[in-house]
């Protein structure tokens, strides 16, 4: 086990809901800054934000102290991704690699667009449905270059090292061979998931082709460098909270008591609120 645990505050599917992360000593930490990028040689940590098959768009709150996971809000309303026929919610365990940041001032040479100001996204393709706030160890297999409303938004394809089939997956071609149709479905999902909200289809670099493991790891390493500049104040994060408890070279480091005070100020965990029934609608529309 990773030694990390999570603690919920308020009720899921409300504006107040938060998931905080704790280390093996039970101290509150930032999943963005305090969880190491590497779990092992060539194995990365992944923060699970959205379990597979679910719809609530949960994400690391980059602007909140300690960066808890919370549900995304647009125009005052909690966000849920639509069910795009034939998919139910997210079609992988979805999350982020800690200690990475897609710098909005860096114009990516591959996409011609700047970063989306978030940690790098991961689609975990294993058979287990993970839990929100779970920290898993993943093998990186490849990457997709999505362009979301003019911003570079890389999507890393990875598999949980604890998956029973993990040994069979070592690069993107293994996914093509062993999970036929999954990568095509992934592109289709990302292309169209905002269309039910009245948004245009997303675009991709490289004609929506997946790049291999080595390419993916190079991209991840570059986002780790941007993160380091952010958390050591060499880059101005413009509203991003860099508060952390373990990054020694960071001027934003705080003590565990200050971190605890932030969590203690929030309402206690309550049973989940009911998800709106229209989240279960299925959207059918012509693929372009």
Image (cartoon, rainbow, N blue to C red):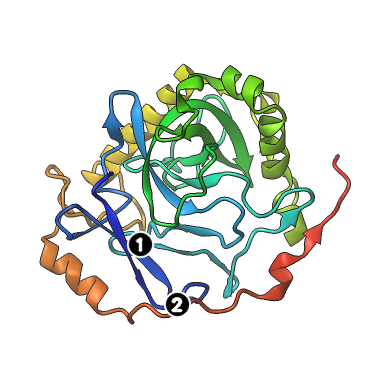
Tell me the element at label 2.
loop
The residue indicated by pointer 1 is 68
Q: Position of residue 237 (x, y in %)?
A: 34, 51
Whether residue 198 is visible, yes or no, is no
Total numbered circles:
2
In the picture provided, is 35 more to the left or to the right than 71? left
**What is the residue that sits farthest to the right in this orientation?**
286
In the picture provided, is 25 more to the left or to the right than 139? left
| 2 or 1: tag closer to the N-terminus | 2
Query: Going 67% across and 33% down the picture, which residue do you hit?
Result: 182
Q: Position of residue 148 (x, y in %)?
A: 62, 44
* CA neighbours of label 1 inside 10 A, class few (<14), some (14 to 19), many (20+): many
Q: Is residue 107 above or below residue 48?
A: above
Q: Position of residue 56 (x, y in %)?
A: 57, 63
Query: Going 53% across and 79% down the picture, which residue do you hit?
Result: 273
Whether residue 67 is visible, yes or no, is yes
The residue indicated by pointer 2 is 11
Task: Place residue 252 in its image quadrant.
Answer: bottom left
**What is the residue that sits farthest to the front in this orientation?**
164
> Are discs 2 and 1 less than 8 Å apart at CB?
no
Tell me the element at label 1.
loop
* CA neighbours of label 2 inside 10 A, class few (<14), some (14 to 19), many (20+): some
- Which circle, 2 or 1, is nearer the viewer? 2
* Quarter in which the C terminus is drawn: top right
Q: Position of residue 98 (x, y in %)?
A: 34, 43
Work out whether residue 165 or residue 258 is closer to the camera in this orientation and state it.
165
* Quarter in which the N terminus is drawn: top left
């Amino acid at each position: 086990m990773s030694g990390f645990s999570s603690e919920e505050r308020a009720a899921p599917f409300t504006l107040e809901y938060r998931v905080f992360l704790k280390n093996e000593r039970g101290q509150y930490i930032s999943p963005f800054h305090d969880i190491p990028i590497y779990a092992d040689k060539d194995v990365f940590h992944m923060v699970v934000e959205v379990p597979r098959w679910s719809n609530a768009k949960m994400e690391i709150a980059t602007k909140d102290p300690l960066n808890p996971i919370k549900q995304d809000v647009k125009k005052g309303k909690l966000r849920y991704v639509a069910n795009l026929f034939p998919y139910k919610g997210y079609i992988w365990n979805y999350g982020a690699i800690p200690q990475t940041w897609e710098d909005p001032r860096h114009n990516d040479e591959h996409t011609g667009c700047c970063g989306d100001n978030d940690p790098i996204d991961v689609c975990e393709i294993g058979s287990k449905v993970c839990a929100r706030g779970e920290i898993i160890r993943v093998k990186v297999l490849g990457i997709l270059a999505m362009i979301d409303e003019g911003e570079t938004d890389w999507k890393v394809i990875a598999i949980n090292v604890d998956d029973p089939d993990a040994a069979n997956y070592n690069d993107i071609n293994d996914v093509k061979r062993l999970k036929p149709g999954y990568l095509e479905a992934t592109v289709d999902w990302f292309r169209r998931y905002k269309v039910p909200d009245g948004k245009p289809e997303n675009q991709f670099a490289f004609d929506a082709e997946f790049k291999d493991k080595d390419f993916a790891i190079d991209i991840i390493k570059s986002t780790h460098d941007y993160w380091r500049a952010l958390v050591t104040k060499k880059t101005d994060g413009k509203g991003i909270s860099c508060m952390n408890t373990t990054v020694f070279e960071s001027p934003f480091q705080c003590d565990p008591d200050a971190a605890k005070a932030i969590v203690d100020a929030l309402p206690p965990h309550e049973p989940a609120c009911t998800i709106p029934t229209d989240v279960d609608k299925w959207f059918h529309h012509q693929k372009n």
